[in-house]
Amino acid sequence: MNYYAIGSCRIEDYELESFKLFEAGVASLEELEAEKDCDIAFRFYTNSKNELDRITTEFPHLNFECGEEEEKDWDLWWRERQTPVKVSESLWVRPPWVNFSAPNAGDTVLALEAKTAFGTGEHSSTALAARLMEKVNFKNKSVLDIGTGTGILSLFALKRGASFAVQTEIDHLTIPCLAENFEQNGEKPPNAVLGFLDTFNEKAKFNVIVCNMIRTEVLPMRADIERLLEQGGEFILSGQLECEKHFILDWFKEAGFRVCEEIISEEWWAIFSSFTKEVNYV
């Protein structure tokens, strides 16, 4: 059982009164709408009736009104309020515990739980990457997903017909989450590589590379990205600030990437390109 008390004071007195309440053992105060504009109302909780009585007795001038309610399962409360997210025109993401059918027959619905990984489609950079992926014909193509996180982009590529996908990560804590998400979505275990791109040998090539990472993380990998992308292959890069896009465009111009499309959401910028020039490495 949870016990609560609701009190009020003048706005100018609230800072001092809240300090005294914290000193008396109140863990947190929830501000509420007061009946008078010059007042401020607040509530605190405790799981001890004796503690509630002690504190309210110590502050009679705050006119506390007390009550009790069933203890709330905050994890269950949060889970019940999670809803499916429309990431792009044809991609939806739902929490694994939420039943949902997409409105259009051709849409992809992924069941994802982020846990310690990034990417459930709610961030603009993930949504931008998914939107650009809709421009690609993935049928029978190999895909490299750099900095995969939850695996959302790999899974989207596989659902759109990719024959093979490899995921890279440098955070070992994301790998169990990645494996769970692949199983949850009816895919074989992920081909996850824990490490950097220099772990791939010289013969490794991919038809499509997708990457949703910030500029300072991507640019040090530019030579490896060029090495791993097939001639004529497609590269989708998201996670870039629009104000910094010139760094990427300069790289693409120098390396021989042909820009196919650029899109923007809020301050984020993403680009879809194809690799057209052979690059020789010593």
Image (cartoon, rainbow, N blue to C red):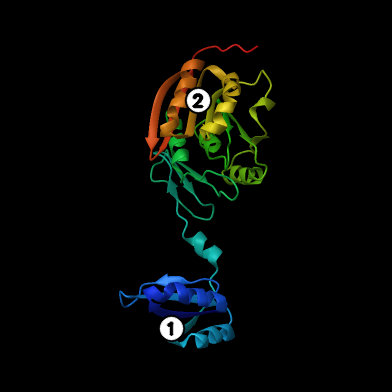
Which residue is at 38% across, 32% downward?
263
Residue that protrudes farthest toward the left in the picture: 37
Q: Tell me where residue 19 appears, x and y as whole percent.
A: 50, 73
Which residue is at 56% across, 86% downward?
54
| Label 2 crowd bin: few (<14), some (14–19), many (20+), radius 10 Å | many
Callout in the foreground (2, 1)? 1
Which SS class for mark 2?
A: strand
Which residue is at 64% across, 27% downward?
197
In this rendering, the answer to whether 210 lies above or below 187 is above
Quadrant position of the C terminus in the picture: top right
The span from disc 2 to disc 1 (Cα, nearest Å) is 63 Å
Give the amino acid type for the residue marked by disc 2 in the picture: Phe
In this rendering, the answer to whether 198 lies above or below 38 is above
In the image, taking residue 190 as reference, residue 68 lies left or right, namely left
Q: Earlier in the sequence, mark 2 or mark 1?
A: 1
Closer to us: 155 or 269: 269
Disc assigned to residue 62:
1
Residue position marked by numbered label 2 in the rendering: 235
Q: Tell me where residue 156 appears, x and y as whole percent.
A: 51, 36
Which residue is at 46% across, 31% downward?
133
Quadrant position of the N terminus in the picture: bottom right
Closer to us: 35 or 274: 35
| Label 1 crowd bin: few (<14), some (14–19), many (20+), radius 10 Å | some
Could you say which quadrant of the image residue 178 lies in?
top right
In this rendering, the answer to whether 21 lies above or below 57 is above
Give the amino acid type for the residue marked by disc 1 in the picture: Leu
